[in-house]
Image (spheres, helix red, strand yellow):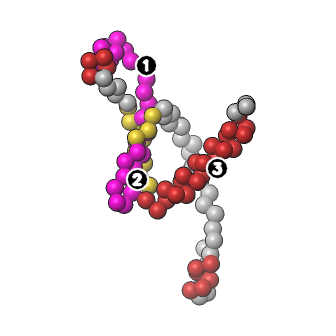
Amino acid sequence: MPKPKNEKEAKELTVAVVPYEKEPKDRIYSNFAVIRHNPYDFSLEFCEILPPTPEQDKEIRTTKKIRAHIKAKIAFPAKLIPSLIQALADNYSKYEKKFEKK
C-alpha cells in the first residue's frame, strides 16, 4: 500500500474490508446466544442446545436449568456495536423481503 503524501490524504483514505479464508472453515451452528458487556467491549457466547438425554431431562426438571454448550466466544469493541446492530437490521430486513411470505 503506497504511503500517503500528506496528513490530509491519509485522513481521506477509504478502503473496503473483504473477508477471505485461505482454507474454508466449517460453519458453527448456534440456537442460543448470551450477550455480556463491560465498559470496553461486548462479549457474545454462541451456544447450541440439543434435545436432552433422559438423564439430562431429570436434571432439568430438578434444577430448572438447561446446559447450553458454548461453541464460540467473540468480543467486540463497544464502538463497533452500533454498526453491528445496523448491519444485522439491514440483513434481517433483506431476509424478510426474500423469504417471509406475508
Q: Give the mark nearer the N terminus: 1 vs 3.
A: 1
The image quadrant that residue 93 belongs to is top right
Q: Secondary structure at mark 1?
A: loop
* Nearer-the-camera pick, 93 or 3: 93
Disc 3 + disc 2, Cβ < 8 Å? no
Q: Residue furthest left?
A: 62
Q: Secondary structure at mark 2?
A: strand
**Position of 48 relative to 82 (above/below):** above
Which residue position holds label 2?
Answer: 42
The residue depicted at 34 percent of the width and 11 percent of the height is 54
Q: Give the mark nearer the N terminus: 3 vs 2.
A: 2
- Magenta part of the chain: 35-59
Compute the Cα span from label 1 to label 3. Answer: 32 Å
Compute the Cα span from label 1 to label 2. Answer: 29 Å
* Nearer-the-camera pick, 13 or 20: 13
* Residue type for callout 3: Asp
Residue 86: image tag: none
* Residue type for callout 1: Pro
Q: Is disc 3 surrounded by few (<14), some (14 to 19) or many (20+) residues within 10 Å?
A: few
Quadrant (top left, top right, bottom left, bottom right) of the N terminus: bottom right
Disc 1 + disc 2, Cβ < 8 Å? no
Question: Is residue 49 part of the magenta span, yes or no?
Answer: yes
Which residue position holds label 3?
Answer: 90
* Residue type for callout 2: Phe
Q: Is disc 1 surrounded by few (<14), some (14 to 19) or many (20+) residues within 10 Å?
A: few
Quadrant (top left, top right, bottom left, bottom right) of the C terminus: top right
Q: Secondary structure at mark 3?
A: helix
The residue depicted at 60 percent of the width and 48 percent of the height is 89
The image quadrant that residue 95 belongs to is top right
Which residue position holds label 1?
Answer: 51
